Image: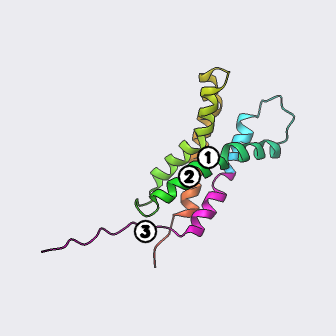
Amino acid sequence: MDEKPLPKLPLAPPWWRLSLAFLIAPILPALLFAEWVWRESASTATLFDRFMLVSLFGAYPPVIICGIPLVIVFRKRVKPALPAIVLAGGLIASLPWWIIAIVGDSGIIDSILETALPAFVLGLLGGAIFFLVGVAGYREH
């Protein structure tokens, strides 16, 4: 009776690198989103205030709610690939803005174009940063 060897699991980056990636990846997209979306706003809030608002409500909660569970589930099951991680970053970053667009009282198309689409584009950047910090160059020794 020939036993087939178990399939080899993909390489999984260490938790410390993934944790660092989760902390660093949302910073630049949140900063750019705070400037891009509210640039022409009548708000008197400073860029730092807008950045903190975006970070605390639109960047880190989706990472905690969606990103961390995705990594826990797929960490040793799927080989990390740049296109998949970048796409996941875009989807995770735009999730709260899609929800606001759908349940908000302003026009859904305007909300999508003004918030969800820029969040998706900047989330792609966040996914690329996540890949560079957490995955790129990792080789198991």
- Work out whether residue 105 or residue 50 is closer to the camera in this orientation and state it: 105
Q: Say what amino acid the circle numbered 2 marks.
A: Gly
Q: Earlier in the sequence, mark 2 or mark 1?
A: 1
Q: Secondary structure at mark 1?
A: helix
- Which callout, 3 or 1, points to the residue nearer the camera? 1
Residue at (77% x, 47% y) in the render: 52
Residue 127 magenta-highlighted: no
- Farthest residue in the bottom direction? 141
The reply to whether callout 2 and callout 1 are in contact (CB within 8 Å) is yes
**Label number found at residue 84:** none
Q: What colour scheme has been applied to the protein in the rendered image? A: rainbow
Picture residue at 45% right of the left edge, 51% below the top: 84
Characterize the local packing of mark 3: few (<14), some (14-19) or many (20 or more) Cα atoms within 10 angstroms.
Answer: some
Q: In the current view of this chain or complex, which residue is farthest to the right?
A: 44
Residue at position x 47%, y 61% from top?
A: 75
Dot 1 corresponds to which residue? Answer: 62
Quadrant of the rendering where the N terminus is positioned: bottom left
Q: Position of residue 92 (x, y in %)?
A: 56, 45
Q: CA distance from mark 2 to mark 3?
A: 19 Å
Question: Is there CB contact under 8 Å for labels 3 and 1?
Answer: no
Q: Given the image, on which type of amino acid does mark 3 rest?
A: Leu
Q: Amino acid at mark 1?
A: Pro
Relative placement, left or right, of 106 versus 138 is right
State the image quarter where residue 100 is shown: top right
* Residue 11, numbered label: 3
Q: Position of residue 20 (x, y in %)?
A: 63, 64
Residue at 44% x, 57% y: name it. Answer: 81
